[in-house]
Image (cartoon, grey):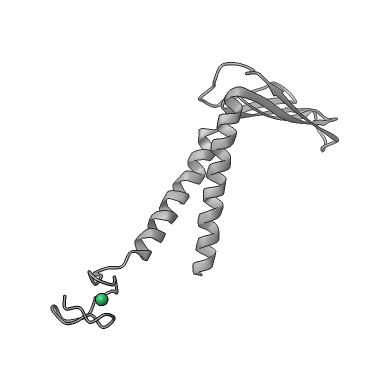
Amino acid sequence: MKKRWAILRWACTAGLALAIAAYAFSAFYTAWVTWNPPYRRITLRSGGVGLSWEGAGWFGTCRTEVLSGRAGPFRWWFDIGGAGSTYRAHIPLWCPTLLFATPAVLLWRSYLRARRVTNPCPKCNYPLTGLAPGSPCPECGKRG
Ligand SMILES: [Zn+2]
């Protein structure tokens, strides 16, 4: 099970790095993927992910574009709206950043805590837990 936790720890770390990179990107650039028809668009801009949805049905042809230059002011909060069959939403990127950061921090902390040797020998770092106080280190022979 140790390996599974290591995979999860690194996955959360990678997700966090990706979210921060996307956050930084969206402050200076705009990138989007559009499916036509019907109209669906996922936009990365202004510190968030924008979703636009119009009409019924599934995805058609896909188009990707990256534009330089800020699309608008930095938006910190959610913005959900739309009318009828049209739908749009802006999800701030600190949301996924926090979503990955929380488990990443917890997993790294527990990993580093488990790795730390309790009551180590001052000379060779061998754990002396369970030995009588003052008894010699079984590894290097130094008296504690
Ligand atoms: Zn020792």
Residue 25, by quadrant, is top right
Which residue in the rendered view is the most extreme toward the top? 72
Q: Position of residue 58 (x, y in %)?
A: 82, 38
Which residue in the rendered view is the most extreme toward the left? 134
Q: Residue at x 51, y 45 (%)?
A: 100
Residue 131 sits above or below residue 43 on the image: below
Q: Residue at x 31, y 67 (%)?
A: 117
Q: Nearer the viewer, residue 35 or 57?
A: 35
Q: Position of residue 22 (x, y in %)?
A: 59, 34
Q: Position of residue 86 (x, y in %)?
A: 73, 24
Along the horizontal axis of the image, is 80 left or right of 62? left
Along the horizontal axis of the image, is 70 left or right of 118? right
Q: Nearer the viewer, residue 89 or 138?
A: 138
Q: Is residue 15 visible?
A: yes
Ligand 1's quadrant is bottom left
Q: Residue at x 86, y 35 (%)?
A: 60
Q: Position of residue 28 (x, y in %)?
A: 60, 23
